[in-house]
């Protein structure tokens, strides 16, 4: 029940209608007996400044930030967590007594999802397809978690080069730009961070012939849960991981930042599955 004491959280995005975060968090609040309510806020890019003023004026306790605001919100905040600053993107804001603190739980959420699948990033050789915001968070998290090498391939190579330059400033010699894809014989984990696979008739982000035995294939897309890439990888007998785990764990970490309470992970997982009608 919403009362005069209910604390408001939400997500700022454009569009925002597809988001599963309200379902995941509201179920978690109910299960934990917390008097919070999580709402979707459709905020056009030119209204972001007003929206952030609204967070302050309305005493909204916190928000998630999604596409296309993750980078542009940074100068509008009062404090930035170190990891969020390194990544250059914020997906979680906490309003502490009128001061807005920015965090990035995508990066840690990604690592948590890998570990949950029994995969330790240390010493792994990774190929990332794509060089947008998601690729950047994932690449940084892998760098900070001790991978042996990171190659980034992108349709527009300049964007891959920009991320690689950033990574090399944090820790040199690990990351490089891939200008072509060849069979991934020497790669442990392939990550699709492009948007190819979101739509039914999208081509695969990589030719099937380049997948090799032993490769782990992680697609950051969670809807559909089985993208064309993951279907092809399964067909070749490879281990596959969808973006559901990252979605879940970034939410778990945000929940903890807002409430200070241990999140009900399995309730959150079930809420996502139910929303996507996965058993
Ligand atoms: P996100 O925040 O989810 O990472 P984004 O920043 O829009 O989203 O990044 C989308 C990524 O998918 C980019 O790497 C983009 O490649 P470009 O940088 O060349 O635009 C990639 N992408 C989108 N459509 C693509 C396509 N048809 N073929 C190849 N890559 C594509």
Image: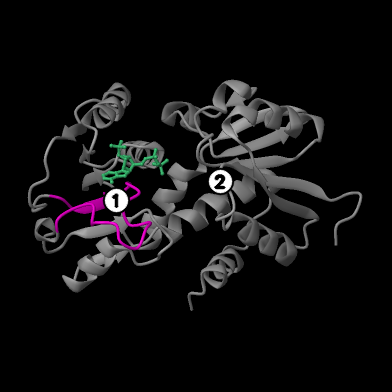
Q: Quadrant of residue 149?
A: top left
Q: Residue at x 23, y 38 (%)?
A: 155
Magenta portion: prevailing SS class: loop
Q: Quadrant of residue 272?
A: bottom right
- Rate crowding at label 1 as few (under 14), some (14 to 19) or many (20 or more) other CA atoms within 10 Å: many
Q: x, y percentage for residue 116?
A: 40, 61
Ligand 1: give its quadrant: top left
Q: Which residues are magenta?
A: 187-207
Residue 140 appears anywhere in the view:
yes
Q: How is the image coloured?
A: one colour
Disc number at residue 15?
A: 2
Q: Is residue 113 left or right of residue 127?
A: right
Furthest-right residue in view?
4
Nearer the observer: mark 2 or 1; the answer is: 2
Residue toward you, 256 or 136: 136
In terms of secondary structure, where does tag 2 sit? loop
Q: Is residue 186 left or right of residue 135?
A: left
Q: Residue at x 74, y 40 (%)?
A: 61
* Residue 137 is covered by the magenta coloring: no
Disc number at residue 192?
A: 1
* Residue 197 is covered by the magenta coloring: yes
């Amino acid at each position: 029940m919403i009362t005069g004491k209910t604390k408001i959280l939400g997500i700022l995005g454009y569009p925002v209608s597809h988001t599963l975060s309200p379902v995941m968090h509201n179920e978690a609040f109910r299960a934990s007996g917390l008097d919070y309510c999580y709402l979707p806020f459709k905020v056009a890019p030119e209204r972001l400044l007003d929206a952030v003023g609204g967070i302050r004026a309305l005493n909204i306790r916190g928000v998630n930030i999604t596409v296309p605001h993750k980078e542009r919100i940074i100068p509008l905040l009062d404090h930035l967590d170190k990891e969020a600053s390194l990544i250059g993107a914020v997906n979680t804001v906490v309003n502490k007594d009128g001061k807005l603190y920015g965090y990035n739980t995508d990066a840690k959420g990604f690592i948590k999802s890998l570990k949950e699948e029994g995969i330790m990033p240390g010493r792994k050789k990774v190929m990332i397809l794509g060089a947008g915001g998601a690729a950047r968070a994932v690449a940084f998290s892998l760098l900070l978690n001790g991978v042996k090498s990171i190659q980034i391939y992108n349709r527009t190579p300049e964007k891959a080069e920009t991320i690689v330059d950033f990574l090399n400033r944090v820790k040199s010699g690990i990351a490089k730009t891939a200008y072509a894809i060849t069979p991934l014989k020497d790669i442990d984990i392939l990550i699709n961070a492009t948007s190819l696979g979101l739509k039914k008739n999208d081509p695969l982000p990589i030719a099937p012939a380049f997948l090799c035995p032993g490769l782990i294939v992680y697609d950051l897309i969670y809807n559909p849960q089985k993208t064309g890439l993951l279907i092809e990888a399964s067909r070749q007998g490879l281990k596959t991981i969808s973006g559901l785990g990252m979605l879940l764990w970034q939410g778990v970490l945000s929940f903890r930042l807002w409430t200070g309470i241990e999140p009900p992970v399995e309730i959150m997982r079930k809420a996502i599955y139910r929303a996507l009608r996965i058993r």
